[in-house]
């Protein structure tokens, strides 16, 4: 299995493999969610890594539901004094957000044990490329995703 990410040839991959800022504190996460809500429209893609990438953006209602549900999940399952599992290109005007699964962190800031740790979920303005083909994901959150949008 290759651990080298696909070359950044699409806008999505350029953002995905580019510089992302870590959201380290809980208030920063709250601000990011608020900024996403303020920019909410029908032009966002939600991608559960391990599922097929979406072919169309989600509705505004789906985006808002996801933000509420992933916020609750992270606060419940990431019992730490800091956040540190969310990365985005620009917290004030995000176009790509990586959210790591609290139960599959490994080394979320880089490859660990010979393989890349993929985020659990991605919020993107660009249509996502299929990361599952290059980086298989454990299935521990697929049921959560399918319950939310299945």
Image: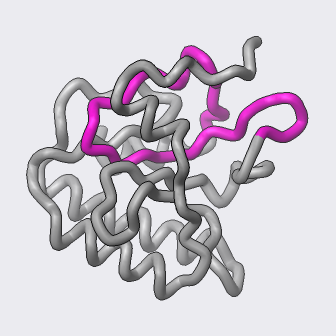
Hey, which quadrant is residue 14 in on the image?
A: top left
Asked whether, in this view, residue 100 is left or right of residue 107, the answer is: left
Q: What residue is at 64 percent from the left and 69 percent from the top?
A: 84
Q: Quadrant of the N terminus?
A: top right
Residue 10 percent across, percent down from the top left: 37, 23
Q: What residue is at 56 percent from the left and 18 percent from the top?
A: 6
Q: Nearer the viewer, residue 88 or 79?
A: 88
Q: Is 134 included in the stretch rendered in magenta?
A: yes
Q: Nearer the viewer, residue 135 or 92?
A: 92
Q: Quadrant of the C terminus?
A: top left
Q: Is 127 included in the stretch rendered in magenta?
A: yes
> Which residues, given as a range, are shown in magenta?
111-139
Hey, which quadrant is residue 125 in on the image?
A: top left
Q: What residue is at 45 percent from the left and 29 percent from the top?
A: 13
Q: Is residue 85 above or below residue 147?
A: below
Q: What residue is at 52 percent from the left and 29 percent from the top?
A: 50
Asked whether, in this view, residue 114 is left or right of residue 135, the answer is: right
């Amino acid at each position: 299995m290759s651990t080298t990410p696909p070359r950044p040839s699409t806008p999505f991959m350029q953002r995905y493999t580019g510089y992302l800022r870590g959201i380290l504190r809980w208030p920063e996460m709250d601000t990011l969610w608020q900024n996403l809500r303020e920019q909410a429209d029908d032009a966002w893609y939600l991608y559960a890594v391990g599922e097929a990438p979406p072919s169309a953006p989600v509705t505004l209602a789906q985006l808002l539901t996801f933000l509420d549900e992933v916020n609750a999940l992270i606060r419940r399952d990431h019992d730490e004094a800091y956040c540190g599992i969310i990365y985005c290109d620009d917290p004030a005007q995000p176009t790509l957000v990586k959210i790591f699964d609290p139960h599959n962190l490994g080394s979320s800031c880089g490859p660990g044990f010979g393989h890349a740790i993929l985020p659990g979920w991605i919020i993107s303005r660009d249509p996502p490329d299929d990361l599952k083909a290059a980086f298989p994901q454990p299935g521990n959150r697929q049921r959560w995703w399918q319950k939310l949008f299945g």
